Amino acid sequence: AGTTKDILEEIRGLIPGYSSLPYRTLTNVLAAVESVTGRLEITDIIRELLVKTIECCPTDLPVLLYLLCGKIGPAYEATELGIGEKNIVDALVKSLGCSASSLNQKGEGADGDLGTAAQRAKASQRTLNFGANPPPLTCQHVLQSFRDIAMCSGGRSMNQKISIIRKLLMRCGKEGDEVKFLVRGLQTKLRCRLAEPTVLTALAQSFVESPREEALLARSTKSRKTDHNKSLDKEDIHGPHESEPSRNDFLVHALAVLRQPTANRVQKWEAAEAIVKQAYSECPNYDRLIDALISAPLTDVLRSCRLSPGVPVKPMLAKPQDSFQEVLRRMQGLHFTMEYKYDGERAQVHLLQDGSFKIFSRNSEDTTTKYPDLLPILREALQPTTTSFVIDAEAVAVDPVSGKLLPFQVLSTRKRKNEKAEDVKVQVVLFVFDILYLNDRPILHEPLIQRRALLRRAFNSIPGKFDFAISLDHHENGDTSPIEAFLDEAIAGNCEGLMVKTLEQNATYEPTKRSLNWLKLKKDYLSSNAGPGGRGPADSLDLVVLGANHGQGKRAGWYGAFLLACYDQEAEEYQSVCKIGTGFSEEFLAAAKPQLDFLILSSGKPDYYNTSLECDVWFDPKIVWEVRAADLSLSPAHKGAIDKVEKGKGIALRFPRFIRERADKASEDATSSEQIADAYRSQALVEATLSAGRSKF
Ligand code: ATP
């Protein structure tokens, strides 16, 4: 890999006229990124690449962004490559003429990475030259081939996929890093510490740097001045129908900075970053984001790239709390509401302009065909004036006779796809708790108190089928008893606990954010219920299954213990936090065996598994399990949130117990290393407070 200086020079030396950027340019950049560790340096490199791409071949921008993020399309378009490591090895063996064992990532000189092993094999491949070399790969061709791989279906699909991979491998150079990053791209992990937020930061900066930006801004400002001098900021954020002033101060500020001729470069970078990240969180689609950025100045991006029915937004998430006092402290002086926390599955429901409905999971997966029975209910619940919407809701299993709510476990027995309304066995009720879009207008920037009023005007409740989440509003006044009483009510109604949400101040809907404006309080996780000392995390953890040991005795023939991990987005790695063998039923272990066997990595532990523990078998990181722990402790063996709390130490779970599988979470949505560190810190705070209290008395 070249140095940062070399690569920046190489990028700056690119000249316009490409129909598509050479794939080798991208892989040189990725190799340079891999060789540096500082986030700023990585951002500089990616920014320069994007600046040059805006100049040389702007149509390649979305292609580049997908490749840089290890994606082949927007999350909601079900774009899985559908190939395992075994298939990639198969393709490598066939096209490079090497043996599978030479690709062994654990052998001498190997670093555990299949991409590196494949690049080595390509470099030593003997080739006979029969004339013209195949043309070099372009970024567009690589992304299109990945999409073709994802589209292959039917009996011979694996052969077709392998054949596409072989064609790609043939066109890679012997030198350089094309094979390495191609293989990693097929594994959907580039492993160069390039997380999506960094790519978005670099993208925002690159448009500030682009000479086109100034011209676009001048043109836009001029046309608005002649357009009756309308208030720019309100419209930029909300679109032309907005009548209320904006509450999103940070966006208003960002827009002002971008129009301010005296603002310096760094201020403009930061402002652009706020705008671009907001636009992407409302409309997580690179094609649309780039369209908006290319055709209008940054100040206008939120007008065209905004929430719209059909494109799911990543949901707003809550911070767990383990005591009533903590909830009051967070809500100090604020008007807030408490809602029942229903124990079901998140459902983001969209009514599109053409009158059709779409239902998306927490994971932005299209689950419309799972709920055919909800569609007539939704139609019935609509007020005649409601023509389009996006609502946030929880689908909960219900006993049709008694009307009692049933736990998630019952809902999970429902067919996942292509259910017929007449075959539905588990009835559901939809509890709606938010509305983000109504009648052609995004309203996620309104405070919750207004969104809720609009929600209640837009729908009729149909008891037992479609209802508003039960809620109780409250002004923080230092008294925890109303929260305690409402929590008891929620538990008696078969709910998991409460969601506590700000109503007026800091009360906009923040897609993708785990915000302090939403708190979750689960009865079972209150520190007062957590046993002696009141320790323990305030929530369960959703962990990725990395590996397993073969079972013994009663568990012979199945797996007996599993290694679980949290996810660190910055390092792009899974960090082990526990070995677990408790909480599994025999039926579960028997059913899990073939599912896990399919995911076995023949080459052993990959380099993006950070653990010092060994397992009999290692798996592709695809499965997420919910786990409860007694408490968290510092560990030399486990690597959860390594270095985040104490240098050289990881965090481990003590006495972990399996609760259930989380099929609605991808492995990147698992509990993050940040969350593990936060949970450890708040546990340490509780312990310190308790021991100070004990020493007092
Ligand atoms: P997280 O979403 O925080 O990663 P999770 O997916 O494990 O965690 P929970 O810890 O159960 O989910 O808590 C949040 C979830 O609670 C939401 O994603 C939503 O599905 C559900 N929920 C139930 N009732 C409500 C409500 N009234 N408001 C918001 N979310 C609710």
Image (cartoon, rainbow, N blue to C red):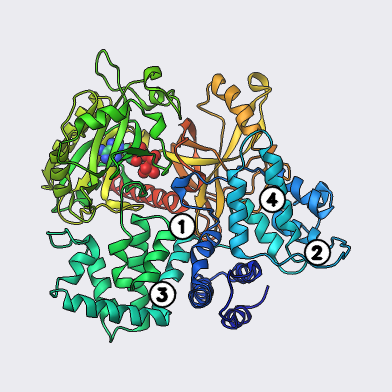
Please give the name of the residue rendered at 18% of the width and 78% of the height, measured from the top-left corner. 225
Secondary structure under tag 4 reads: helix
Which secondary structure, mark 2?
Answer: helix
Closer-to-camera residue (169/537): 169
In the picture, the quarter occupied by the C terminus is top left
Residue at image mark 1: 645
Q: Quadrant of the N terminus?
A: bottom right
Mark 1: which amino acid? Val
Q: Amino acid at mark 4?
A: Ile
- Do tag 1 and tag 4 residues touch (Cβ < 8 Å)? no
**Residue in view at x 64 percent, y 43 percent:** 83
- Mark 3 = which residue? 207
Instruction: Give the x, y percent position of residue 408.
Output: 37, 27
Q: Position of residue 326 (x, y in %)?
A: 25, 47
Q: In this figure, which residue is indicated by the disc labeled 2?
A: 123
Look at the numbered disc 1 and give the secondary structure of its residue.
Answer: loop
Instruction: Tell me which label, 1 or 3, sits earlier in the chain.
Output: 3
Residue bearing mark 4: 164
- The label nearer to you, 1 versus 4, is 4
Q: Which mark is residue 81?
A: none
The residue type indicated by label 3 comes to Phe
Q: Quadrant of residue 588?
A: top right
Is 301 placed above or below 371 here? Answer: below
Pointer 2 or 3: first along the chain = 2
